[in-house]
Image: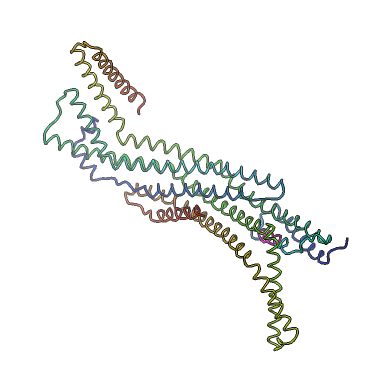
Amino acid sequence: MSMHPKFAKWRTSLDKMLAEAGQLAGTDSDPVDRRDLRDRLHFFIRDNPDVLPDDPSTEVYGEMDEIARRTRDDLLLDEIAKRIDRIADRTYELGELEKKARARAALNEKTAKSLRLEKATKVVTSLTESVNAIKELKAQLDGSPSTEEDFTALATKLGKALQSLQDLRTSVESGT
Amino acid sequence: MARYLGVPLLAAALLLAGCQSLPDTQPFTDATISLRSAVGTSGKAALTELKALKFKESDERARLREQVKQLEAAWKTRENVMKAMSDYATSLQAIVDAGKKGEESVKQLTGAAQTFLGAVGAAGMTGPAAALVGDAVNFAGGFVIRAQAAKSLEQAMVDLQPAITRTAELMAADALDLRGMLDLCYEQQERMLDDEDENAASLAFWSSLQRERNDVIREVRTKLDDKKLADEAGKAALARLAQLDELIAGLKPWRESYVAKVAHIREQQRLSSALMDEMQAGFGVWAATHHKLHVAVQTKRPPTTAELTDTAKRIHDLIERFRQL
């Protein structure tokens, strides 16, 4: 098979770019230089002769296109990897900072609650409800229940008094 | 409760003299929420663009999948840290609100206490004197709470300032790397567009037509300068120019569609770059404002938060435009 007349020129151009890619690999060279090389590889693919089905000597251009595309894409993936690696390297420290912020936020919320005097107000309100429930119970007992409805009402008031006292106890013990 | 009821009016007056103002932390809260949204949007955009990349070789595709997984895991931590910062900002707000509503809280407590006294049948104070004492207690109590809120706020901010500063530094660095990564994705999108069969052939044809047209125009200009445009070579050059223009016109529908697609990719790139740049700068302003708020509590002077408010608004607008693309 005879060589395509322009093959040597295009092959030289590709070899030069492949040598550059080899030099840039694994270095911290200027990203502009690496972008420039990717662009040139891309234009190489666009501009070199097309592969013609009835001209076997043009097959080499298809092969060179594949090499150029592969090199171009690998260079791109290397660049992406560098950035993602840098982001990943910062993850552990950000995780620790998250914990500090969460802990401080929880403490602040507790402080705000305390400043709103919620606990004190809740304690006093629960105490008042307990007293009222017990007073109602006392009134009920003095009135001597005579019907089933009276017993149901009494049980409800007892339950309410006990629940109220339990809430009060829970408030005081848990500090909420 | 007893100690509030027992506070003398003189002590209340002294408290008034050293009154503690609480800063408006709402701009800081709004900016934190805005930055949190920006972090979420930028992470999603980066992963979407990364996943959309197409590579021919299986090992390249496998490498890309690993990179996507790595970025997904890393960005989850960013979202978590911003959630924690949002909660922190909201909790500062809660302290400020509790401080400002101190008088109301004391009033609710004294009200509850009055109700209790009524329930147990205890004789409390009544009449105008009782109202006056009640008002003074509420007022003084409110100032005590305000002072406590200011102290708690200061302590909270001193405690977390180093973490805020460091978070801002790391997130700004992330914004820079994410911007670089997105630029690479958009670059590859344009390449992928060029690599599509229809575009590859048409682009090559378009380029060769443009190159030849430029050569022919130079030839025509030379002939014109030499006043030889009417000779055989001049006429041939003009004819060739007309042929080339006809071929280029034939490619016009393809060209318009292709250029529109490239323009769309570049518009996405422009917006995403703008968002990353705002995020990068925004984190710096955010950390600085937190420090200013702390100083404001210490010095009892209101802080200036206009810059942070402006930053938050710009970020919000960019996110909206980005989402519409």
| Residue A116 belongs to the span the image colors magenta | no
Magenta segment, prevailing SS (helix, strand or loop): helix
- Which is more toward the observer, B315 or B158? B315
Direction from residue B134 to residue B156 in the image, left or right: right
Which quadrant of the view contains residue B113? top left
Q: Residue at x 64, y 71 (%)?
A: B249
Direction from residue A20 to residue B180 in the image, left or right: left
Rendered image coloring scheme: rainbow
User: Magenta segment, which residues?
Assistant: A33-42
- Which is more toward the observer, B278 or B197? B197
Q: Is residue B146 above or below residue A52?
A: above
Which quadrant of the view contains residue B120? top left
Which quadrant of the view contains residue B129? top left
Direction from residue B150 to residue B112 in the image, left or right: left
Q: Residue A150 location in percent, x, y?
A: 23, 14
Q: Residue A80 location in percent, x, y?
A: 63, 51
- Quarter of the image with the N terminus of chain B in it: top left
- Which is more toward the observer, A47 or A84? A47
Identity of the residue furthest to the right in this view = A1
Number of disc labels: 0
Q: Residue A60 location in percent, x, y?
A: 81, 59
Q: Residue at x 42, y 41 (%)?
A: B88
Q: Residue B155 location in percent, x, y?
A: 38, 41
Q: Is residue B285 above or below residue B6?
A: below
Q: Is residue A15 visible?
A: no
Q: Is residue A93 visible?
A: yes
Q: Is residue A113 above or below residue A4?
A: above
